[in-house]
Structure formats: structure tokens, C-alpha cells
Image (tube, rainbow, N blue to C red):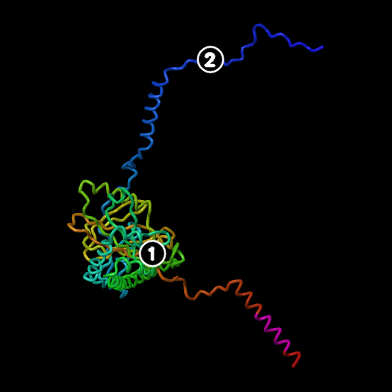
Amino acid sequence: MANSPEPVSENPIDFRAPPPSPVASGRRSSLTNDDVITEFLQHSLNVPNLILPDKFFPKQKSVEDPPTIDFEALCSDQYDDANVTKVMESIARIGCFQLVNHGISSDFVRSVQTQATGIFQVPPERRANIARSPEKPYGFEEVHGEEADTELSEEFVWCREQGLKLAMEGIWPIGYSNFSKKLETLMTDIEKICQRILQSLLNINSQKQFVYGNALVQGKELGTVCCFYKHNQNVLSDKWDSYLRYDVIRMLIRGTDYSHALCLHLCDGSSEFHVYSKKGWVSFSPDKDALVVTTGDQMQAWSGSQLYKHVIGRPIFKGEKEDCISMAFLYSPPSIMTNCQTNRGKKISLSQQVIVAILLTLVYRFSVYLYTHF
């Protein structure tokens, strides 16, 4: 007999979902949320202006003109101890001094600077082919966006690299060859001056041991490089201070891209010369036709950060009617030199001792063989 289905209850259980909870008007809430989100995004997307408090910004200090070194007297070893001490104190205090009677013709320097204006007349679209990069540490410094409006100067780095020569002859075919020859002559004279200054500093500090050379240079060994600066005069007077503050911050953060021992600045006609370091910022008025010499990171390393310090120098041309050109030669010694005592014995490495021992053993065995068989 088949089972009959069970009778269905008269009040079956209701499995339907409960009704949704009441909410406020969706349209008004959506408008309110949109306003809040829009205001949040507007505040979030605005890049804040970096305003440093005065107590954290390095204040400018005016100092007396740094002492001068007579280069002719320095070469003739007729420099008295009082002047030497004065110069050394200036180097230790602000990291620079001035050089006079250096033998470089001011007319020749001006002719090089005049020809250098042709570099900065290269159109921007052609400058991109010779912009500085990690692979090419020479050429124009790229400036992007608002930085172009806050730059007090344009920069171009020249060196003896063959790649630079080929690139410049391509974008400046007329005039570059003559300019390059003049600059090469000037750079050779600058290097001779730097070599003599370094040798004098080593003699003055003969009680200390200094070893210098390109072993301290990181990256490519470029030797001496020349930085050309075109100082723009189209800066409004009320914007000068803010642009200068920006320039100081940028230099203190970036430092210099080239390791060097000395930097010789050719900046005749500048109204001021600024010296920047991590501990301060000083300014003075350079003497006419004088070379301003600043010390670099290699000098600081050689002295153990005690006697010399690394500074960055920058001439200021204010109130000029036309754009001005200045040059800075960053000198790094071409070879390793030392002022250690020459009577010290030369050390022989372990590998050299092993080679000598093997050779002596072979000679001994060969001698024994000849003696026993002949």
C-alpha cells in the first residue's frame, strides 16, 4: 500500500527575508558626501609650499675679504710665515682665499667668456642632445617646470671628453673649434697653478701625511672640468632674495657633482662672492682680477676633516645691465702623490715574497742538478 503524503500545515513557516531598514533620503546624502569628498581631494592634491623657518635657514654673514696669496712670491719660495699662517686660518675658517699675480691675462679670460656666450645661444630643443646624465657627466644642466623661473644662472660643464667634442661640433659647428682651443690653453694654465698651490699646502703641512689622487674620485675620471655659468639679469628686484634662498637650498642639498681638490673661480666684475658650507654661508667682495680659490671634498678627506673643509663658491652679479659669464675650474690631481719620507723602505707584498721564494727554489734545484750530473 502506497504511503500517502503528509498533510501540509495550515500555517507554514514564512522564510522570506525581513524588509530593509528605512534610510534617509539618498539624494541629499549623496550630495553631501560628494561635497566632502571633493573638498578632501582639493586639499590633498595641492602641493604645499616649502617655507623654512628663519632659524633653520643658513643666514648670510658678511666677512672681511679673505687674504690674498701672491702667486709669484709663492713660486719663488719667498712667502713669509705670517702670510702663510693668515692664509691657512682663512682656509680653515671659510674654506677660500684669493690669488693675485697669477699670470693669467684678464683680456684672454674675457675673450674666452665672450665666446662662451655662443654655448648658451644653442636652442633648447638642441640642448636635449647634450644634457647631463649619469652616462654623460658633461653638457647642459636640465631644468624642468617651475625651476626654470627660479634659476639665477644657467650651467654648462666642459671637459676633455671626446664625446663632448663630437656633440658640440654637431650643434655648434661654427666657432666651437676655436673656442675649445682657447679653453684648453686656459685650463692648462689653471692646472699648473693648482699643482703649485697643492704642493705648497703639502710643504706647509709637512708634519702631516697626505695622499691624494684620482683614487678618491668616484665615477669617471674626468680630470679637470670647467663649469660655465650664465648669470641672468632679468630677475625682478623684489624676487631676488627668494630666488637666492632657493638657490642656496638647492646647492646645499645637491652639493657638487664632481669630486675635486681645489676650485678656481674666474669671476671678475662680480658684486659679491658667496661661500656655502653645511655650517654656514658667508659673502665678501672679491678683489679685481683676483682668482678666488675654494677647497673641495678631496682636501677635506686628506686632512681628516680637521684642517680643510669642503665648500661651494658662487659669484653673484647684481645690478648688471647684461648677462654675465663666470667660470669655475674644478681640479683633481692627475696622479697619486705623497709627501712621505723618501728614506722609508719599500714594503714587499706577500705575493711578491712567494714568487721570489719559488724562483730561488728553482734556481737551487737547477744548480744541484748541474753539480751532480756534470
Label annotation for residue 159:
none
Residue 337 appears in the rendering: no
Q: Nearer the viewer, residue 312 or 34?
A: 34
Could you tell me which quadrant the C terminus lies in?
bottom right
Secondary structure state at the residue bearing disc 2 = loop
Residue type, label 1: Ala
- Where on the picture, by quarter, is residue 353? bottom right
Residue 316 visible (yes or no):
yes
Q: Residue furthest front?
A: 1
Q: Which segment did they paint magenta?
A: 359-369
In three-dimensional space, the C-alpha distance between marks 1 and 2, rounded to whole angstroms, equals 83 Å
Q: Is residue 184 magenta?
A: no
The percent position of residue 324, horizontal first and vertical second, equals 23, 60
Instruction: Give whichever of 329, 182 is nearer the camera.
Output: 182
Kind of residue at badge 2 = Pro
Magenta highlight on residue 363: yes
Q: Is residue 123 above or below residue 19?
A: below
Residue lying at the far bottom in this picture: please name it.
374
Q: Give the residue drawn at x 61%, y 15%.
A: 15
Secondary structure mainly formed by the magenta segment = helix
Q: Secondary structure at mark 1?
A: loop
Looking at the image, tell me whether mark 1 or mark 2 is earlier in sequence order: 2
39 or 254, nearer to the observer? 39
Q: Residues within 10 Å of mark 1 (few under 14, many from 20)?
A: many
Q: In the picture, residue 335 is in which quadrant? A: bottom left
In the depicted structure, whether residue 24 falls above or below residue 238: above
Circle 2 residue: 19
Which quadrant, please, contains the N terminus?
top right
Residue 26 drawn at (x, y percent): 42, 20
- Residue bearing the label numbered 1: 261
For residue 233, what is the image quadrant? bottom left
